[in-house]
Image (cartoon, rainbow, N blue to C red):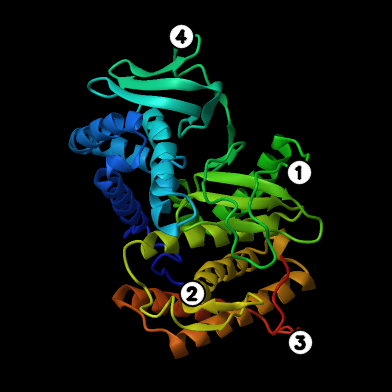
Amino acid sequence: MTAPTALLSLPDPARPVLPGLLRKVRLLAARRLLGFDAAALPAAQRPGLRALQALLPTLLRSAPERTLAALGAPDVLPSLLAFDVGVVPPGSCIAAAVPHLLAALGTAPEDLFWPGPVARLQDPEGTGRGFDPPARALVLGPRGLRVETEDGQFDWPEGEPTSLPLRAGRLSLWDSNPLAMLEEHPDKDGNALDLAGRAASEWTEALDAALDVIHGALPAWAAELPLILRRVVPVGWFPEMHLSASYREAPGVVYLSLHPSTLTLAEALVHECQHGKLNLLSWLDPILHNGRTTWTPSPVRPDLRPLMGVLLAVHAFVPVAALHQALAAAEHPLAEGPEYARRRAQLLASNARGLAILDELAEPSAVGTRLLAGLKAVQEACAQDAPAVPGVDLDRLPDG
């Protein structure tokens, strides 16, 4: 039985949802920037912010796609969405986002002056430059972005690559996410960038192999990767486990450790991109009215979780089950052997437990009801195709 399309889980190419979510969240970020009180910034930066606030509506009208893309850049959007977390002061978030926003915009109808210090600039295509000492100021105008340093001015193109292209997204060699070291998982300690002494080419080859698997098994799902996978940040290598993470405030940015198993990397990419989709929706809809107030044991974590955490897990793992189903149906080499069958059975059982918890306790919004119905339909289709695996402990979490 082929898994059906489902809202944010297995997309219907004829009814794309993700572009609209991205657009609305970027508009939300624009609203935050426009509504920020410049008085909260150092006095020298207040005129620059006010000038940007006056310019932004004009740019949104005259060049909406370019402007929204700049607001959605991986070095801009996380800082603009991090206001509510409380870890980084909102003024610091603005000061961190604006230089990268100017770099992403590229030009402006008239000169806009932003005073330093600016320690680093990054554009969305993965070119960056550090300044030591920090740059004195930036000027964005009709000729592009100019940087004033201690020894004069130069134009933006004098940067250096700070990421490498992947089949989807880029492997990032520098991370600006202000929340990267904020950690909620009891078995992890933040997400510091770490190539683990491996060559960057080893990372790109492994990730491209995993992306090839996803494209072959779930082509409609993979077609959305350019929207939801902007950067992969490397976070080490661990021989006996695999780590991955993402942040609600940083849609499109995924943190992954390297792993010798192509299947494990493919599962992790699907998992974290699914988190990104649900996180986008969560900025616009409650999804579960009691998602943050009702707590329960989790089918995939050792600690108690709010219902929204359970939904995040199920929403991430149900498409992984669809990946398993597609690989098995295609008789892919990765789907051979008892270990694959064991993992597939344990994952389906974990998904069933999570859906049962949500069915019993969740109070979904209208969109949340559609989301849950889609997850149940996909889970049912995947479970029908899966063979029974005698002797497997279905109460144990799958490895990885």
**Residue that label 1 marks:** 196
Mark 1 or mark 3, earlier in chain: 1
- Say which element carries label 3: loop
**Pointer 1 local density, CA inside 10 Å: few below 14, some 14–19, many at least 20:** some
- Give residue 103's position: percent from left, percent from top: 40, 28
Tag 4 residue = 152
Give the vertical position of 235 relative to 145 (above or below): below
Q: Earlier in the sequence, mark 1 or mark 2?
A: 1
Single out the mark in the foreground, 2 or 4: 4
Q: Earlier in the sequence, mark 2 or mark 4?
A: 4
Direction right: furthest residue: 239
- To which residue does mark 2 refer? 311
- Judged by depth in the image, the label closer to the viewer, 4 or 3, is 4
* Marking on residue 390: 3
Label 1: element kind: loop
- From this view, report whether residue 141 is shown above or below residue 190: above
Left or right for 360, reference 193: left
Q: Residue 234 has which mark?
A: none
Q: From this viewpoint, is residue 179 visible?
A: yes
- Marks 4 and 3: CB-CB under 8 Å? no
Q: Nearer the viewer, mark 1 or mark 3?
A: 1
In this rendering, would 17 be left or right of 246?
left
Residues at circles 2 and 3 in contact by the CB criterion of under 8 Å: no
Residue 393 occupies which quadrant of the picture? bottom right
Q: Do the CB atoms of the residues marked 1 and 3 lie less than 8 Å apart?
A: no
**103 and 117: which one is in front?**
117
Q: Earlier in the sequence, mark 1 or mark 4?
A: 4
